[in-house]
């Protein structure tokens, strides 16, 4: 059985391309800008995930759950 090669999507090529095309004197600044952008995106994603989780917790209504909901379940 032959393995199927993974498609090359081109992801991850922007950073080396940006650093390779930048003049040597500007490479530290370009690298810093790229690290800063990645950090900001990571933090933004974390805040959005926390916001979605909080919204889901607020939207959950406990009125559907009663003591009788657990009838039939036994503990051993």
Image: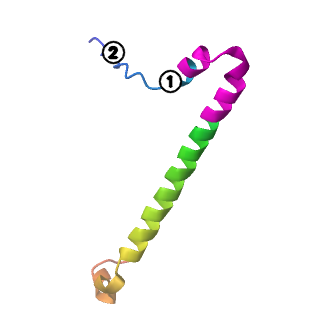
Tell me residue 63's x, y (percent).
31, 86
Q: Which mark is residue 42?
A: none
Q: Quadrant of the C terminus?
A: bottom left
Which residue is found at the position 68% from the left and 33% from the top? Answer: 32
Span of residues in magenta: 17-34
Task: Write down the residue under mark 2.
Answer: 5
* Image quarter of residue 58: bottom left
Q: Is residue 26 above or below residue 59?
A: above
Which residue is found at the position 28% from the left and 11% from the top? Answer: 2
Within 10 Å of the Cα at label 2, are there few (<14), some (14-19), or many (20+) other Cα atoms?
Answer: few
Residue nearer the viewer, 66 or 32? 32
Tell me residue 64's x, y (percent).
28, 83
Classify mark 1: helix, strand or loop: helix
Q: Does label 2 or label 1 sit earlier along the sequence?
A: 2
Q: Is residue 46 above or below residue 20?
A: below
37 to the left or right of 45: right
State yes or no: residue 24 in magenta.
yes
Task: Write down the residue under mark 1.
Answer: 14
Q: Quadrant of the N terminus?
A: top left
Which residue is found at the position 35% from the left and 83% from the top? Answer: 62
Tell which tag, 2 or 1, sits nearer the viewer: 1
39 to the left or right of 74: right
Which residue is found at the position 52% from the left and 58% from the top? Answer: 47
Tell me residue 60's x, y (percent).
36, 76
Please identify the dominant SS of the magenta region. Answer: helix
State yes or no: residue 70 in magenta.
no
Tell me residue 37's x, y (percent).
58, 39
Say whether residue 75 is visible. Answer: no
């Amino acid at each position: 059985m032959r393995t199927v090669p993974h498609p090359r999507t081109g992801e991850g090529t922007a950073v080396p391309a940006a650093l390779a095309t930048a003049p040597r004197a500007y490479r530290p600044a370009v690298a810093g800008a790229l690290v800063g952008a990645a950090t900001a995106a990571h933090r933004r994603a974390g805040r959005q995930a926390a916001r979605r989780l909080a919204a889901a917790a607020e939207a959950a209504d406990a009125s559907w759950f009663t003591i009788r909901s657990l009838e039939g379940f036994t503990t051993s």
